[in-house]
Amino acid sequence: MWKSAEALLAVAVAGAVGLAVLPAGADPAAPAEPGTAAQKTGETGKLQQAVNVPAPGPAPASAPASAPASAPVIGLGRTALPEEIAAWNIDVRPDGEGLPAGAGSVRRGEDLFLQNCATCHGEFGEGAGRWPVLAGGRGTLQSDRPEKTIGSFWPYASTVFDYVRRAMPFGNNQSLTADDTYAIVAYLLNLNDLVPEDYVLSKDNFPKVELPNQPNFFDDDRETAEKAFWKNDPCMADCAGAVHVTARAQVLNVTPDADPPKGNLE
Amino acid sequence: MSTQNGSGSRGPEHASPGRAGSILSRRRFLAAAGMGAGAAAAGAGSAFGGAVAAAGPDPNIVPVPEWTKMLGAGVNANPYGKPSVFEKDVVRREVDWLTASHESSVSFTPLYALDGVITPNGLCFVRHHGGEAEIDPDKYRLMIHGMVDRPLVFTLEDIKRMPGRVNRAYFLECAANSGMEWRGAQLNGCQFTHGMIHNVFYTGVPLKTLLDMAGVNPKGKWVLAEGADAAVMTRSIPLEKAMQDCLVAFAMNGEALRPEQGYPVRLVVPGWEGNMWVKWLRRLKVGDQPWQQREETSKYTDLLADGRSRRFTFVMDAKSVVTSPSPQAPLKLKGPNVMSGIAWSGRGTIRRVDVSLDGGRNWTTARIEGPAMPMAMTRFYLDFDWSGQELMVQSRAMDDSGYVQPTKAELRAVRGTNSIYHNNGIQTWLVRGNGETENVEVG
């Protein structure tokens, strides 16, 4: 938060300048002017709720000379410091961008996994109870019970590193060092028969690790693969022959309130 | 809707003396209705009064009720108001066997008891991946960095002082809503089959405003949104969507975001799967490719029958469900009844909803009532007379893109049964002769 009255005043003044400038940049022809009736009846009679943003552009002539012409100066927020960005910038991409310096062996990873992870995921990544299974499952994706593990399903090894680094161990996350994280990921890759027992995973060799199911992912194609669902005018009468009940929830009876309210007609 | 008389397990425990009378009254009405569906349908409203009058005065009228004789509670007995004690069972519920922990789990909106289009804040379903973060608003920070001209840090006050604040109503549906129903009817109640959705009014500023302040590099194509909770939830969002209609929201339905909905700031990604609406939003990073995070690779991808998987299936397709009658809201009386339901589409505005009472053989267009806004929940009704016959109730939503909600069979023919996510197939409720209602599938 603001540290002093002077700082507050300075920001308030900057903000006031921004406020004075912006309305001049807003498009008066926009269908819903910001700050006024946001959702109103459009020409079609349907309610519209488009988001309208003042177009960024050169500051009007009346703007202070110090305002950069390339961006809307509102006078809010401040520059992020490099050490602040470093503290939160923990994401890792498949091409290795974001990987920290470090390395870890499969053997060290096994020790760490047993200490930190096995309670939920099992000693060999087989999963305990309803906690995620991390290893095995190859060849099950077309079965009635697909087992989606790192080796059988996940497309990128970088995701494993990223996720362990940001959110594991569950309940004590972001407690592992970079070397520890490399080691645990190395052990998980070994459990999935992707690297040998003597493997040492590091920032340098990480991008070379490929997961087998990666080629089987493709971008959303519903608009072509499911084009038939755009029917416009579906059938209204005599659309099917005799209709029968084919499955009932009562048979499984897994609803939390085991005794749902009954109808009152007797 | 919840009945004022309660029924079975849902009724208030501390029944007043008047309650027995009300059940009695209902029985008398049933007797009247039993004289014939036609007679009941012809004038059930007046028939009710007539039947009671013939048997003696209604004990809810004579003598004068307690609440009329005595003073009630003062104006500030509940400084933050609560629902009536008679509505105490209208709450979010969890399915214990579904997940391994309460911190990474989901609770469901009680759709069966709600009406209109706005979900009350306290009943909005909750999905956490690492529990509910409690963030002091004075300590809240939002960072924008990556492929931008000026990496920036904002406080909550900064966001609340930004020009161009907007109010928008949008549905938020978890991609896994109805995910337990892919293999067949499983959960008995629309709270559980469809309750991973809510619809509220958000107040906030367009994400574009913040990104423009930082100055996005022309090579920037994606935005990573990250939460500050113990899951540090992340999703990659196409820059085009981020600039189009996403919001950085700090209020819902007129008050500060609820903690379980991301207080003090969450991302709003209209029409797209709820997992992308990052709660406790702490960081936005611009990049030139997606980050392939856990929640967009191992989760929230749609495994098809052939073993391949669709990814980046962001849009929520048109969907609807009848909320009453439904297993938790059975039919109680013959004669006039109001069928009530909700419809929504991430591709636009709900144009029409059809309802079937015979399992999809014949359809009637329902009455859309209230605002039908793009990417927002829309309410529909069908006023109908019920003579006590068995019904197979379905609803079918259509949006202004021409998309028609598919049957479950049509959906399975394209995707198989392993998708988990994006199950928008037509729901069937079997209403029995006694009004009891069950989740079924038909064919």
Image: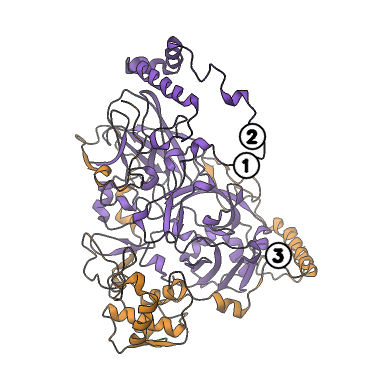
Please state the horizontal and vertical placement of residue A208, each as a whole percent of the image. 35, 84
**Chain of the residue that carries numbered disc 1 in the rendered image:** B
Q: Residue at x 44, y 87 (%)?
A: A102
Q: Residues within 10 Å of mark 3 (few under 14, many from 20)?
A: many
Q: Position of residue B175 (x, y in %)?
A: 39, 55
- Chain that appears purple: B
Q: Is residue B362 above or below residue A129?
A: above
Q: Dot 1: what SS? A: loop
Give the foreground label among 2 and 3: 2
On the question of residue B116 being in view, the answer is no
What's under tag 1, amino acid-wise? Asn
Q: CA distance from mark 2 to mark 3?
A: 58 Å
Q: Depth check: B166 or A5 in front?
A: A5
Q: Would you name the residue on which mark 3 appears?
A: A59
User: Crowdedness of circle 2 by 10 Å Cα count: few (<14), some, many (20+)?
Assistant: few
Along the viewing direction, whichever of B357 and B111 lies nearer the viewer:
B111
Pointers 2 and 1 in contact (CB under 8 A)? yes
Color scheme of the displayed model: by chain
Q: Residue furthest left?
A: A242
Q: List the residue tagged with mark 1.
A: B78
Callout 3: chain? A
Q: Quadrant of the C terminus of chain A?
A: top left
Q: Secondary structure at mark 3?
A: loop
The front one of B273 and B227 is: B227
Q: Is B167 on the left or on the right of A226, as rendered?
A: right
Query: Percent x, y for residue B279?
Result: 52, 60
> In the rendered image, which residue does mark 2 sit on?
B73
Q: Secondary structure at mark 2?
A: loop
Task: Examine the rendered structure and indicate whether residue A12 appears above or below residue B412.
Answer: below
Which amino acid type is shown beneath numbered disc 3? Ala
Q: Is residue B116 left or right of residue B167?
A: left
The earlier-in-sequence mark between 2 and 1 is: 2
